[in-house]
């Protein structure tokens, strides 16, 4: 627990604060809707295609959603084990291993993920035989893996260091080698502490796929906005709203699944109580 359970007075203050926030939010929302109405952004013809025309979904939104999920899933599957290996290497007692790994991790976190995607796209174009139509997917996934693998490495390092020092000492006392201590003692206990930060990073992966759509013409959700607007009139604001809702739904599904996994992990094994928060991205 980060704070004590609020009492009657605190709950009353929280309710009053919530009502005050709604009192400020309602006029602001009304002003936004009024401004949209004056500029004809609420006209039926701008929103009706999402209800009346199934081709908007079958030809644009669903393919874009599939591309987003495909790129994000590939990046997650590759970045998580890569980050785990790099994190273990960072914790190595051998300087010849931890030193170069720290350099790679710092470089991966310091370079903006969009720049990594652009660099990877140019590298695939100049140095490989990847087809032009699949090159954006390769570039987006590679950039996400490099950046998020480095971030996950720091999360793993922080999760292990958050454990009590006695865990490592006890393992050494019974004759365990360093690799055995890491595999059987430290990492299993650190998993529950790392899950909240890892979940946040997975959400970042899903959102960052949109960078490839804007800069590399990768056919993910956000890239479909231009295509829909070009085929159904100047309804860019309506398209962006629908795409934002789809991103929210996708990330909500991801966080709900991660929360269930975290709950099972915490009830399935004893936890140290430590929780690792995601470190700020050095971009």
Image (cartoon, helix red, strand yellow):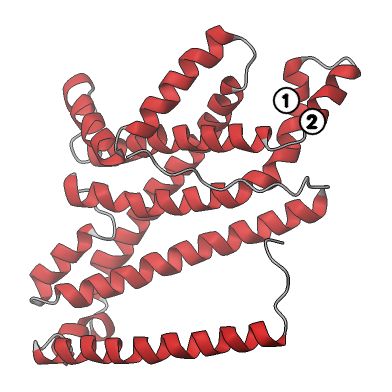
Can residue 60 be seen at all in this image of the molecule?
Answer: yes
The label on residue 185 is: 2
Residue plotted at (67% across, 55% down): 261
Residue plotted at (44% across, 26% down): 105
Q: Quadrant of the C terminus?
A: top left
**Crowd around label 2: few <14 · some 14–19 · many ≥20 (10 Å):** some
User: In which quarter of the view is residue 179 placed?
Assistant: top right
Residue plotted at (50% across, 85% down): 18
The location of residue 84, given as percent across then percent down, is 58, 31
Q: Is residue 168 above or below residue 154?
A: above
Q: Secondary structure at mark 1?
A: helix
Q: Secondary structure at mark 2?
A: helix
Give the CA separation, mark 1 to mark 2.
6 Å
Name the residue that disc number 1 marks: 182
Marks 1,2: beta carbons within 8 A: yes
The location of residue 239, given as percent across then percent down, is 22, 73
**Crowd around label 1: few <14 · some 14–19 · many ≥20 (10 Å):** some
Can residue 48 be seen at all in this image of the molecule?
Answer: no
């Amino acid at each position: 627990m980060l704070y004590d359970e609020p009492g009657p007075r605190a709950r009353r203050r929280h309710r009053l604060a919530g009502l005050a926030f709604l009192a400020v939010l309602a006029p602001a929302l009304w002003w936004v809707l009024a401004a949209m109405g004056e500029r004809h952004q609420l006209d039926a013809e701008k929103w009706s295609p999402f209800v009346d025309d199934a081709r908007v979904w079958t030809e644009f939104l669903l393919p874009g959603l599939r591309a987003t999920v495909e790129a994000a899933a590939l990046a997650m599957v590759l970045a998580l084990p890569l980050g785990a290996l790099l994190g273990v290497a960072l914790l190595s007692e051998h300087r010849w291993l931890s030193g170069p790994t720290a350099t790679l991790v710092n470089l991966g976190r310091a370079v903006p993920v969009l720049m990594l995607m652009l660099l990877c796209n140019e590298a695939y174009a100049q140095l490989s035989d990847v087809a032009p139509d699949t090159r954006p997917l390769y570039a987006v996934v590679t950039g996400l893996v490099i950046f998020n693998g480095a971030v996950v490495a720091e999360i793993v390092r922080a999760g292990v260091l958050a454990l009590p020092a006695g865990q490592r000492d006890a393992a050494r006392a019974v004759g365990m080698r360093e690799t055995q201590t890491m595999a059987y003692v430290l990492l299993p206990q650190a998993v529950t502490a790392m899950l909240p930060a890892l979940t946040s990073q997975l959400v970042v992966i899903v959102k960052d796929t949109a960078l490839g759509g804007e800069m590399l013409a990768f056919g993910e959700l956000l890239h479909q906005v231009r295509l829909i607007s070009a085929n159904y009139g100047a309804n860019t604001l309506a398209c962006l709203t629908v795409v934002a809702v789809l991103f929210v739904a996708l990330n909500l599904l991801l966080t709900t699944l991660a929360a269930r996994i975290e709950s099972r992990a915490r009830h399935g094994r004893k936890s140290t109580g430590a929780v690792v928060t995601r470190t700020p991205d050095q971009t």
